[in-house]
Amino acid sequence: MTDKPADKPTNKPAESVWDFPRPPRVELVEWRIRVVHAGETIVDAPRAFRVLETSQPPAYYIDPQFIDFDHLVPIAHNSFCEWKGLAFYADIKVGDTRALPQAAWHYPKANPDFKPIEGCWAFYAQLVDECWVDDEQVQANPGSFYGGWITSNVTGPFKGVPGSSHW
């Protein structure tokens, strides 16, 4: 099990996911966030919201104004989070090809404590080619359920690895 990515320089404070709160907390970060797939930039944002929750790397939520919606195809799939509410998903397409099913999600009507992320989009680093926080390429949260992004300043162990569903 990986507790942290390879050492990389960062200007961010060291954080353990075990110090993150439960219930989760939303915070605005003034960090450049990028999502790239098949050479196409889907997101290039000067800031984002991140959701911090015990045991999970942060998930980043991007304001729609910084997303190239030519690459998103909304689908009927949805899921429910006890904290944030009902999430709806989109496939990512490049050109005329839907390349990544259910690769992005958002909360069109978030629960009151999560209003800052209402309408913002998050992306699974497990599915796209590249996700970046400032100039650091992130590692994907292990597994396929959680959408957290692991940077060199964030340590685990992280929920999502095989055998961690009972944590």
Image: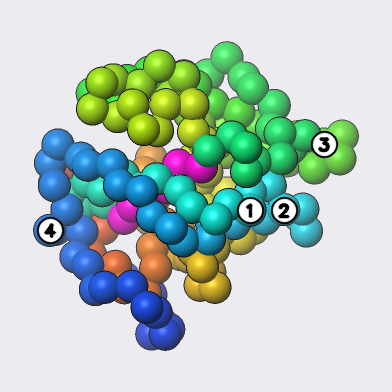
Closer to the chain start, of discs 3 and 4, is: 4
Give the number of the mark in front: 2 or 3.
2
| 60 part of magenta stretch | yes
Tell me where residue 158 appears, x and y as whole percent.
Answer: 26, 58
User: Looking at numbered disc 2 in the image, what kind of residue is underneath it?
Assistant: Thr
Other-residue count near label 4 (Cα within 10 Å), few / some / many at <14 / 14–19 / ≥20? few
- Residue at image mark 3: 97
| Residue at the outermost right position | 96
In the image shown, does 22 or 147 lie closer to the viewer? 22
- The image quadrant of residue 89 is top right
Give the number of the mark in front: 2 or 1.
1
* In the rendered image, the vertical position of residue 32 relative to residue 93, given as above or below: below
Assess whether mark 4 and mark 2 are in contact (beta carbons under 8 angstroms). Answer: no
| 52 part of magenta stretch | no
Can residue 128 be seen at all in this image of the molecule? Answer: no
- Residue at image mark 4: 19
Assess whether mark 1 and mark 2 are in contact (beta carbons under 8 angstroms). Answer: yes
- Residue at image mark 1: 44
* In the rendered image, the vertical position of residue 9 relative to residue 98, given as above or below: below
User: Looking at numbered disc 3 in the image, what kind of residue is underneath it?
Assistant: Thr
